[in-house]
Image: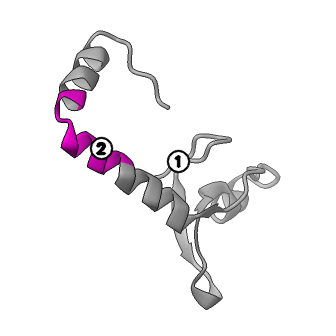
Amino acid sequence: MVSCGQCRRGCTGRHMPKGYDYYLCRTKTQLPVMMPGERCPARYIPVRPLEELVWRDLCEVLAAPEMIAHAMQRARGGHWLPQ
């Protein structure tokens, strides 16, 4: 699940020729039909670097499960931040 860094709406995956895969804000593809003129200015997000970052973070969390317990305590205490 990927969300746009500009407008916070969900992103979709897009496979481009020559193996270039991207996530892009839905306002670039779906919203203009429903709400003309309100396209998000965000650029396409390359899939590979983002997925490598997520995988690296997941491996860190799995190597240190106490991070999950700490994050859950923070979330329950109202300290959760979307970033």
Does residue 50 show up? Answer: yes
- Residue type at mark 1? Ser
| In the rendered image, the vertical position of residue 53 relative to residue 13, given as above or below | above
Q: Marks 1 and 2, Cα distance to the nearest angstrom?
A: 22 Å
- The image quadrant of residue 66 is top left
| Residues drawn in magenta | 57-67
| Rendered location of residue 36, percent (x, y) | 78, 55
Kindly indicate whether the residue at mark 2 contacts the one at mark 1 (C-beta within 8 angstroms): no
Q: Which mark is residue 60?
A: 2
Q: Is residue 76 left or right of residue 19?
A: left
- Residue at 30% in and 19% down: 75
Q: Is residue 2 magenta?
A: no
Secondary element at tag 1? loop
Quadrant in the picture for residue 31: bottom right
Residue 1 visible, this orientation: no
Q: State whether residue 19 is above or below residue 62.
A: below
How many circles with numbers are drawn on the protein? 2
- Where is residue 59 drawn, in percent x and y? 28, 50
- Badge 1 crowding class, 10 Å Cα cut-off, few under 14, some 14 to 19, many 20 or more, is some
Q: Is residue 66 magenta?
A: yes
Q: Which residue is mark 1?
A: 3
Q: Nearer the viewer, residue 33 or 19?
A: 19
The answer to which of 31 and 48 lies nearer the viewer is 48
Callout 2 amino acid? Glu
Residue 61 horizontal side relative to residue 44, left or right: left
Nearer mark to the viewer, of 1 and 2: 2
Residue 2 on image: x %, y %: 48, 52
Query: Residue at horizontal 30%, vertical 48%?
Result: 58
Query: Where is residue 20 shown, x and y percent of the image?
Result: 60, 79
In the figure, is residue 50 to the left or right of 45? Answer: left
